[in-house]
Amino acid sequence: MQISNQRIGKDQPPFMIAEMSGNHNQSLERALAIVDAAANAGAHAIKLQTYTADTMTLDVTEGEFVIGDANSLWKGQALHALYQQAYTPWEWHAPIMARARERGLHCFSSPFDETAVDFLETLNVPCYKIASFECVDLPLIRKAAGTGKPLLISTGMASIAEIADAVDTARAAGCKDLVLFKCTSTYPASPENTNLRTIAHMRELFGCEVGLSDHTLGIGAAVAAVAFGASVIEKHFTLDRAEGGVDAAFSLEPNEFAGLVAETERAWQALGCIKYGPTAAEEKARLRRRSLYIAEDLAAGDVLTPLNLRRIRPGHGLAPKFYELLLGRKVAKTVKKGTPLTWDLFE
């Protein structure tokens, strides 16, 4: 499949998405700097989130509208206030996307309701990303898929049945190019809860490209995901974790993202194919393996012993597997020390 002119698949290096989220800290200047830093770090795309606090939730400051999870980064915050802090002003989208185009990046977004899809269509985004929490919002998926553009769906928390509903809805609405993301919807996510083996199973089960939307710390899980067939990697991205931001704690800084790009491509290159025996690059190295050599000057009729027949490097002589077979045999001619053993030394 393709997103604009970018091919995506197991035969291509991983497609690397830097998720800006709310790490702009309500500064357009910082948002543009994040775009530049992502481009410099080797990202292929920068992703936004398109919503307002009012399209996400109700302005209620009690009960279930306040985050009560003791382990949450946002414990005690009202949902409406959190989304008001984290949202990307819609008037910023055009200049951010323009900067991304200047820097050679694809720029798209996660819409969180139908009005966001309509707005993003006016900006001619190349694809849409459905967030994990919206994976069960089938009307939203139907709306985004109806544009005919590639659809990327995160599956954090979703059961197989819920993923199937999302996939069926997208395809029925006209989606031809689909990526499902293995995702763990905790912030940050622990490696133990990441379950990367699901990636290969998901690819087989739903017959589409699969990636990892990664909330773990560091780059290890994302690199490992490539070995399980992930063709797209998404990581949250910030200029400097120390400067704070709603997602800064589990976001990569520019030098870390550059390392991620390099290591995931190296992991992809290393996958290769099923192969035994030397590669073309190893042919010369074969001559540095052990083989049988004459270790003393010998005259015709001398007997081979452990003292005058050695298993040593390099590998120009007979293979070491013949060592026991040849002990006790007589050589048929004069042989100098350092001669590789060959069959023509015997009668």
Image (tube, helix red, strand yellow):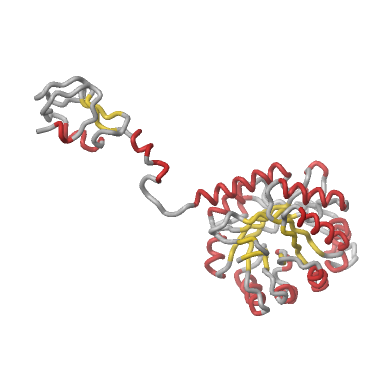
Q: Position of residue 65 (x, y in %)?
A: 85, 63
Q: Position of residue 300 (x, y in %)?
A: 10, 24
Is 155 drawn above or below residue 187 in the view shown? below
Is 251 drawn above or below residue 147 in the view shown? above
| Position of residue 160 in the picture relative to residue 252 (left or right) | left
Q: Nearer the viewer, residue 220 or 258?
A: 258
Q: Nearer the viewer, residue 161 or 301?
A: 301
At 90% from the left edge and 65% from the top edge, which residue is drawn? 60
Q: Nearer the viewer, residue 45 or 58?
A: 45
Is 3 drawn above or below residue 167 in the view shown? above
Q: Position of residue 19 (x, y in %)?
A: 74, 55
| Position of residue 287 in the picture relative to residue 91 (left or right) | left
At 72% from the left edge and 59% from the top edge, which residue is drawn? 106
Q: Position of residue 131 (x, y in %)?
A: 72, 64
Which residue is situated farthest in the bottom direction here? Answer: 172
At 69% from the left edge and 53% from the top edge, which residue is drawn? 235
